[in-house]
Amino acid sequence: MGDQENHKVIGLREDGWVTLREGEGWQRAEVGDEIVINAIGRRSEEKTELDRRDNLQLILGDSSVPASWNEALQSMARGEIAKVGAAEKELEAAGFDRRAEWYELELLSWIPRRDLMHDGTAIEYLLKDGEGWERPGRISEVHLRMELLSTDPHPREILPSVERTIATESPNVPEMLRRSIDSLKIGSIVRIHCKAARTKELVKLFDSPLEGEVSLKVELLEFSKMEDVFGDESGVRKVSFGFGLFLDFFFGSSHFRPFVQRCGCDSFAAEVRTWHEGTELDCHMVLTVDIMPHIIELQVLREGLGFEKPGDGSEATCQISYRKKGDDTVLWSGSQTFVTGDGVTSEGIDAAVKRMKRGEKCILYLRKDRAFSDRFSRFAPVGVLSEEDLVAEIELLDFNRPPAVWTLPFDDAISAMKKRKDRGNELFKEGRYDEALGHYDRAETCMTNCQTDLDVQQRTVVDNIRATCLVNMAACYDKLGNIEEMLAHADKAVSLEPQNVKALFRRGTAHMKLGNLQQALNDVRFAADSGAGNDPEVRRRMKEIVAKISKEVRATCRMSWALRSHA
């Protein structure tokens, strides 16, 4: 850094420091970063250097930096030179020459630095920024290259570099590493300086006894982000990997703790079995894999062609083989053709096939309650046990999607929707209320889309089918214990057909269960007056409501009497 007279004064900043030479780039150092500067202290009228520090390493925002320098250094680009003043007490407190009226500062470089745990036990230094802008996020699977080094000025290798694929939500991942990964981009390299207390947390990652202070060097090679397909974290999650891996997860618990680890060239299927068996999970996992041959030696599964997927209502033809989890013996293998969403195969198979592409091959891990247990047992192929966790290998050979209902002639559209409604009725009778609900919902929604350019008679037909589906959905919600939704759907049915006896009865029942007894009585009485007066269930429900109202009236009278007596 030369004398001041060799620099052109660019301009005076609002807070008093002067730029002598502009730097390069748009990035700026932040509080907590480790900066490297040249600093020369001078008096205003003298060229003599009172103090000179070359390649001085400081922590921006630390007590080692005079307070008035912090804002200036945060505004400077790499290579920028500025003339910055400071009070005598600030200079003296930070260990600089108090006689200097100003310092000429040149910002040489900086390393972004974060206190990951906010207690000084895990300090992260960014050695190389990655590419792009996307980061792993809260739940993801990451492929890392990691190395353990000493904390000496010239670091030595403690453990050789290893590559791991880990799930960030795994309990085996230290919190400090999880926080670091969350902000990385592909290609990012960081060094985490770990105090002894944090070093112990690395044992699970390296499977080796560790102690004392160490530096963990981490490079993010690839990552996959989870896409919440249903948006409520209660159903399917789909993950897409940078190296061509796709996972679907089904889970009914918020305690989702996935952990997959790949080492060397073990088969991916074997690794997932280890994870699935060795980790306490309250979830069901569906795995669809497309792995390039150089990644996996023993098993190559492929992704399908194009972008179209069966969805609901498609006739799908699959080649499927089943085996027990942990056993390579094939229990059954063959071709199956079924209509997706019709509830004619296991829940897991149906859900997986709906999300596959033509020609795709996948491995499916089926927990027994998602396989062929209970209500799905009659769909189990010969030799496939209904009370076992299963592994299925599926290849989607072909599928035919049904035409969109609103593209069909009116009579064909009505026929298609009645077919869906009738299938919902069959599922309801079997006690499969969730699946029945889906069929009723699709029928009602499609009929809504059919209500353009209809004459009065056609609109009446459509409204009748919609009202019937809504009433049946209310019945499903009643069975599932969701009375608010039961009321909402019954109310919608009544708005379509005010004289619909079943709709009035369902709405009255919902009001009764919610404690709205007068509204319940009005609906049930109206249902009886509209022609259902001889229906035993209507008469029983009306009697039940009247009894509850009478009970409430008596209770109110007793309370009023007690209050008057007390007064």
Image (cartoon, rainbow, N blue to C red):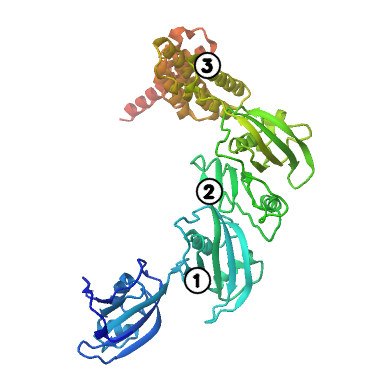
Amino acid type indicated by mark 1 = Thr
Residue 525 in view here: no
Across and down, in percent, residue 467 comes to 46, 18
- Relative to 485, residue 274 above or below: below
User: Which of the 4 quarters of the picture holds residue 524?
Assistant: top left
How far, Cα to Cα, is label 1 from label 2? 30 Å
Which residue is labeled 1 in the image?
A: 121
Q: Secondary structure at mark 3?
A: helix
Whichever of labels 3 and 2 marks the residue nearer the N terminus, that label is 2
Q: Amino acid at mark 3?
A: Asp
Foreground of the two, 555 or 544: 544
**Left/right of residue 368 with respect to residue 305 in the rendered view:** right
Look at the picture and state if 151 lies above or below 566: below
Q: CA distance from mark 1 to mark 3?
A: 69 Å
Identify residue for label 3: 412
Q: Is residue 334 above or below residue 280?
A: above
Marking on residue 226: 2
Quarter that holds the N terminus: bottom left
Q: Is residue 539 visible to us here?
A: yes
Q: Answer few, some or many: residues within 10 Å of disc 1's Cα (few below 14, many 20 plus, some between 14 and 19).
A: some
Dot placed on the residue nearer the N-terminal end, 1 or 2: 1
Disc 1 on helix, strand or loop? loop
Mark 3 packing: few (<14 Cα in 10 Å), some, or many (20+)?
few
- Which quarter of the rendered picture does the C terminus lie within? top left
